[in-house]
Image (cartoon, helix red, strand yellow):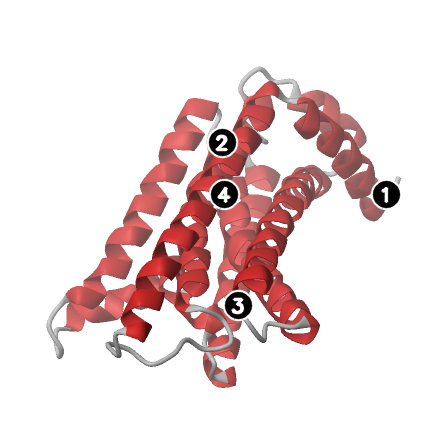
Amino acid sequence: MNGLNETVVIWSAECRRTLRSSRVVALLGLYSLFSLVVFLAAIFLRSIVQQMVEAGMMPPSEELPLSVRGVYYLSLFFLPLYIALMGFDQVSGEVGPRSIRYLTVRSRRSSIVLGKLLAQTTVLWALVFALDFGLCVYTAFTTPGFGAGAFARYLVHFWVASALYSFAFLSLTALCSCLTTSPAVSLILNLAVLLSSLILWMTALADEGNPVRNARYLSPLRYSLGLLSPETAQVALSAAAYAVFSVLFLGGALAALRTRDL
């Protein structure tokens, strides 16, 4: 088989295995529960914003309510952790017991990494689309003037932004899994990188003029807020940043598995 066919076969098999996995089913339930909490938070935030508008403490909301925008950012914040829990053992789970040798005999190592990564991506993007669709449905029912055009525009914007954002962290999880031989070590490494990213992002709280603030640009979390910016240049910058992170992480994963002794 050529590389593309190998990747498709592995992707198909991994999708079926992922959907049958009890851990993934449990995580899907956990994410669904989180989604419910998110919608409850949206209702709560909306009531507070509405009271402030009526009291003249803030101007009327935009076409997209502030509460909905806040809930979307909240979902993005927890997405990297969910990705780490979902896919930390995608490669390391087979490297440790040496079962990956059966795959490498019949498939290229790059096809293994890409097939497993695409399977995780397919499941996650479908779940993210369901969450974004529900958020837009909620907005349509609670916001006057939020018509079909706005519904379609924000649904596409939400999903594309989530896809770009999540793929960088999916690639990071693949990299951590390719670098280690134990799923536990892979998860710890992944969580450590996420914590480091959060710390780098928080350097933005340093005083103006402090050179430490520049470290925030090294964090993938830094560019999440720009994905929904009304400025096209800011959206393009954030999208380009996540494309660069994805290439670096995925390239590292491919190189790590290609050069290691299996």
* Residue depth check, mark 1 versus mark 2: number of the one nearer the observer: 2
Residue at disc 4, secondary structure: helix
* Label 4 to label 3: alpha-carbon separation: 20 Å
Name the residue at 60% across, 26% down: 25
Q: In which quarter of the image is residue 49?
A: bottom left
Vertical placement of residue 229 versus 74, above or below: below
Type of amino acid at the residue the image marks with label 2: Leu
Q: Earlier in the sequence, mark 3 or mark 1?
A: 1
Seen as rendered, the residue at the extreme front is 54
Type of amino acid at the residue the image marks with label 3: Thr
Q: Name the residue tied to disc 4.
A: 35
| In this rendering, position of residue 217 left or right of residue 64 | left
- Mark 2 and mark 3 in contact? Answer it, CB < 8 Å: no
Q: Earlier in the sequence, mark 4 or mark 2?
A: 2
| In this rendering, position of residue 253 left or right of residue 48 | right
* Residue depth check, mark 4 versus mark 3: number of the one nearer the observer: 3
- Mark 1 and mark 2 in contact? Answer it, CB < 8 Å: no
**Residue 178 visible in rendering:** no
Type of amino acid at the residue the image marks with label 1: Asn
* Label 4 to label 1: alpha-carbon separation: 36 Å
Q: Earlier in the sequence, mark 4 or mark 3?
A: 4
Q: Position of residue 99 (x, y in %)?
A: 65, 18
Q: Name the residue tied to disc 3.
A: 143
| In this rendering, position of residue 156 left or right of residue 87 | right
